[in-house]
Amino acid sequence: WVEYSHHHGHNHDWSDDGWSGSEYYGKSGKSGSGKSGKSGSGGSGNSSVDLSDDDWLDDGWSDDGQIECNSHIPNQNEVEILINAMDFFASKHHPLVSQWTRAAFHDAGSYNKNIPEGGANGCLMNDKSMTEEEANSFFEAPVSTLWILKDFWHSHPDTCMKVSSADILQFGIFFSVIRQSGKPGLTKSKVERLVKDFEWGRPDETNCNSAWAENLPENPTGHAYGGPIAIRCLEAGKEIKEKLMDRNGFSTEEAVALIGAHTIGMTRHVFGDKHAGIWIGSGDDDATPKGPVFNNDFHAYFVDEVPAKDLHTFAANHEPFSLIYPNWFREDNEAENFLDTDMVLAFPSVDESAHPSYHTFTRKFAKSNSYFMETFFSAMDKMSKLGVRAYLHKPRECKSRCNGGELTLSQRQYLHKALNEALLEAQEAITILQENRYKDIKNLTTLVDTTTWYVPGWTADGWVGDAWEGDTWNGDSF
């Protein structure tokens, strides 16, 4: 098999599938992706881009009869080819669906509407400096596999288009949550939705800035790190408001819904492999033969499993968590991990001037999966267009070479080999990064002695007595 460099070029000697050297010799007739047109929906952000191709005919060929695979909008058959390749990867390695979901958030979540800057612009895939930022750690597997899929798709003998990394990233979450919704796996109706409903045409940013990663919500550290749970949750709530709401532009309802993506996946590497853990049992990588289940179980957990109904009670009794770490909690028996930015969704705000009461929507989502799903998909669509000013388009109907996009045996063998190599390289990079961050990981996984800082008497304004009031801690142990 030909060695596949997933960061360079698109002509890879597919001798049995139509590629030969750097030239393409199609098996039957001409193949193209056609004219994108000018109608469609846009997002919000930086620059306006006209993606119409006025010199193109409807079949994807230019007026002078030459193939010009420059359309940014794939046709429906081309999308189905990508779906089949992504499903092949997801079936072989279940963690990818949650990792692709996270990647889409971290690309789009770089957006700051107040400037504006960042957004769903492909920088997470295209600019190495973005993944060197701490907020974007451990993206080796999702980024490398998306590159393999993108290059495979572009070089496929039945495709003729040039789709951006920005589109690939956002299609990654669209594919993942639809595939894992209900009964995980693809059905005819799911494929039809994947083929017809996603809008394409996001341009890649050519001048990425790694500082945009500061617009991403992080699990708070600073003066809240390792301190009283009340302060930790207050700071976590402020982080959500300042990043997801004030910068990204989401409403309270949308922010709480989007965090519900934690239903699938786990805290995989940031605390070290020894402390990796799921959020929700049904979201485990191998919860079903087709991977995790995407639903409202994340929100339902706070209602069904956390006895405390307010932060004061939770600060005194941390059930169901038996292990308290500086900025996260662990239910030891089930190995379920929750960040401070998760737990703040469970309780009414202790300071409405600092952040809203997220728990209102947490309880609504816990009560109705259909309400959660409707809100999540609407918020996800908004997220996928942050910073985008280009016209976006749904795929065109396929007019020729519409073979359904099934993968050949040789293509499956190639993808399997490429996936294994990418995952091996990713694990090597992750191991090195964890070794370099040994001290940070040790601090993050050192248990907190909660008896040293709990003081009864919480009010809406802060701890009474000589504990904390407002934003300052007066005790010796914080």
Image (cartoon, rainbow, N blue to C red):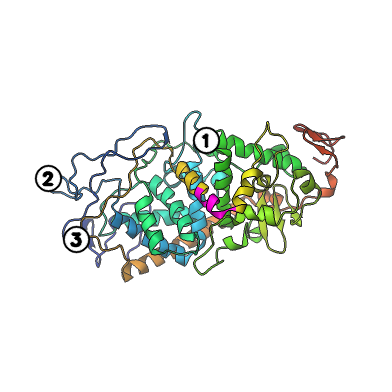
Q: Disc 1 residue type?
A: Gly
Whole-percent x and y of residue 398? 25, 55
Q: Is residue 8 magenta?
A: no
Whole-percent x and y of residue 350? 73, 37
Quadrant assignment, res 37? top left
Please provide the residue range marked out in magenta. 368-374
User: Foreground: 404 or 357?
Assistant: 357
In terms of secondary structure, where does tag 2 sit?
loop
Which residue is drawn at the image coordinates 56% and 57% (left, top)? 265
Q: Give the class, few, some or many, for how many residues have Cα within 10 Å of label 2's Cα (few <14, many ≥20).
A: few
Whichever of labels 3 and 2 marks the residue nearer the N terminus, that label is: 3
10 vs 384: above or below: below
Mark 1 and mark 3 in contact (Cβ < 8 Å)?
no
Pair 1/2: label in front? 1
Q: Is residue 372 magenta?
A: yes
Q: Which mark is residue 64?
A: 2
Q: CA distance from mark 3 to mark 1?
A: 46 Å
Whole-percent x and y of residue 7? 38, 52
In terms of secondary structure, where does tag 1 sit?
loop
Q: Which residue is mark 1?
A: 249
Secondary structure character of the magenta stretch overall: helix
Q: CA distance from mark 1 to mark 2?
A: 46 Å
Q: Which residue is mark 3?
A: 26
Which residue is drawn at the image coordinates 36% and 69% (left, top)? 413
